[in-house]
Image (cartoon, rainbow, N blue to C red):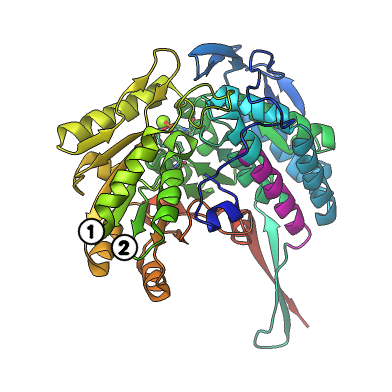
Amino acid sequence: MAVTKTQAAAGKSAKLTRPVANGKHAKVSSGAISVPYQKMFIGGRFVDSVSGKSFETLNPATGEVICQVAEGDKADIDLAVKAARKAFESGPWSKMHGPDRARLLNKLADAIEANREELAKLESLDNGKPYADSFNIDIPLTVKCFRYFAGWADKVMGKTIPIEGDFLCYTRHEPIGVVGQIIPWNFPILMLAWKWGPALACGNTVVLKPAEQTPITALRIAKLAHEVGFPDGVINVVTGYGPTAGAALSSHMDVDKIGFTGETTTGKLIMTAAAQSNLKRVSLELGGKSPNIVFADADIDAAIEGAYFGLFFNQGQCCVAGSRLYVEESIYDEFVKKMTAKAKSRKVGDPFDAAFEQGPQVSQEQMDKVLGYIESGKKEGAKMLTGGNRVGSDGYFVEPTIFVDVKEDMKIAKEEIFGPVMSIMKFKSMDEIIERANKTMFGLAAAVWTKDVKKALRMSNSLKAGTVWVNCYDVFDAAAPFGGFKMSGIGREMGEYALQQYTEVKTVIVAM
Ligand code: NAI
Ligand code: MG
């Protein structure tokens, strides 16, 4: 999801330094990784589930079981919410001032940085993403996110408002209270940071439910947070499934806010649960089908790099994946030819071997889903230029795949595939492409490639999306707000806007 600024601004894909950690060996040993914590983290302690049940988490590169993790359900969510409530109302957290919260967030950032290698290994083991990506992208962005929000912790403030009459009127931006957070498996550590950073900076306490596919790094980071001094109950992690633990959190009567990232249909369930329980505040970061538009006057090689990274990065498992790639007619043939050659050269394999740029999909379910979309593309008459198959028989690897002759009403052009499947379509004019690009229920991101500044600005004004990239793709920064128009979500994460998701505004009026 995130090329560094300079890489992307230069229109280059992340040509990451693949040899990692000590800069020497290209192959990192995954065999020696031990998973330190497998129980839930509630009230400052690791605990078994109330039911005593646990579930398997798998290594997607092999399909083998990594370990058993405690399976939380309603009873565990109840305990976690109680711990969070206590910490919020009467624990040390309730009396802690902004600068002290900032200090803790900075210490957590330092601890994550100090344990970068271990965390990157655990992340790649559980999720399947190349170790170099975990190490060079996910962990550094996480550290930056915590440091950024540490900076806000003592700057969350209201206004003094001149009102009519002899009154003093001011606003306070107060924490909402106990915050439930449900995150997906595509960027497990980074999504945790996007959720915890602003919530904790604003003084809330949290109950996090990580995705069932990738539960282990959240437990490791909860322990780090405890070690650096976050008081008991401020941070709780309940591992478990969506329809059980997740649903219990989103329908809980004592949870004041729910923040979610994941599929749009799940977002609807969560919003419904919030509405039917206590009208808890809701913020949602949901799916996308982002248009990536290349005009004939663009720097074609830069556009190819950007579009390639914008779709294939993270095994195509990005909410912002540029999965509707539109190329202007006059350069279409050349573009398709170059892109196909590039996709064919993409190396798929062991996430711990720096020779490979692409790892497995996160699960059998996701792999099957992606292969199903590829079948549907063929059936509906799109032309497949490369890819289309599973790679090997162990693990969940899928070949980088490119379709052309894709029509707007085909499933592969409408639905979020969440895999390494690119659809390239042709367009003729700016008016036409604005209409086509916006003809979707989603509105998460979009990109435009052109050297003409007028065109770039007209496009960015016209595209209905929460983020528009011009001559770059996947540029993320903790200071830049992120979120969706339309069915891609509600609210903005990151940047100053994230503070709104985690505060209530109180108006105080004093007669003078
Ligand atoms: P999902 O949206 O079902 O799962 C995300 C999180 O929500 C997980 O922690 C899950 O346990 C939880 N969850 C599931 N059902 C829930 C419920 N009823 N109540 C509360 N929490 C619930 O996504 P899933 O099933 O892992 O993947 C399905 C598809 O969703 C993917 O193929 C992809 O298209 C899309 N997706 C989109 C993401 C994004 O960032 N936009 C991230 C992950 C998946
Ligand atoms: Mg689901």
Name the amino acid type tagged 2.
Answer: Ala
In the figure, is residue 268 to the left or right of 425? right
Residue 355 image label: none
Residue 195: in magenta span: no
Majority secondary structure in the magenta region? helix
Q: Which residue is mark 2?
A: 296
Q: Nearer the viewer, residue 370 or 151?
A: 370
User: Measured along the vertical axis of the image, is residue 385 above or below residue 196?
Assistant: above
Residue 511: percent from the left, percent from the top?
Answer: 75, 80
Q: Nearer the viewer, residue 164 or 496?
A: 496
Q: Which residue is mark 1?
A: 329
In the figure, is residue 247 to the left or right of 148? left
Residue 312: percent from the left, percent from the top?
Answer: 43, 39
User: Measured along the vertical axis of the image, is residue 471 above or below residue 222?
Assistant: below
Residue 153: in magenta span: yes
User: Which mark sits nearer the N-terminus, 1 or 2?
Assistant: 2
- The answer to whether marks 1 and 2 mark residues whose Cβ atoms lie closer than 8 Å is yes
Name the amino acid type tagged 1.
Answer: Glu
In the image, the segment drawn in magenta is: 137-155
Classify mark 2: helix, strand or loop: loop
Q: What residue is at 58 percent from the left and 32 percent from the top?
A: 209
User: Measured along the vertical axis of the image, is residue 471 above or below residue 305?
Assistant: below
Instruction: State the CA–CA distance, disc 1 to disc 2.
Output: 8 Å
Q: Is residue 43 visible?
A: no
Location of residue 182 (image quadrant): top right
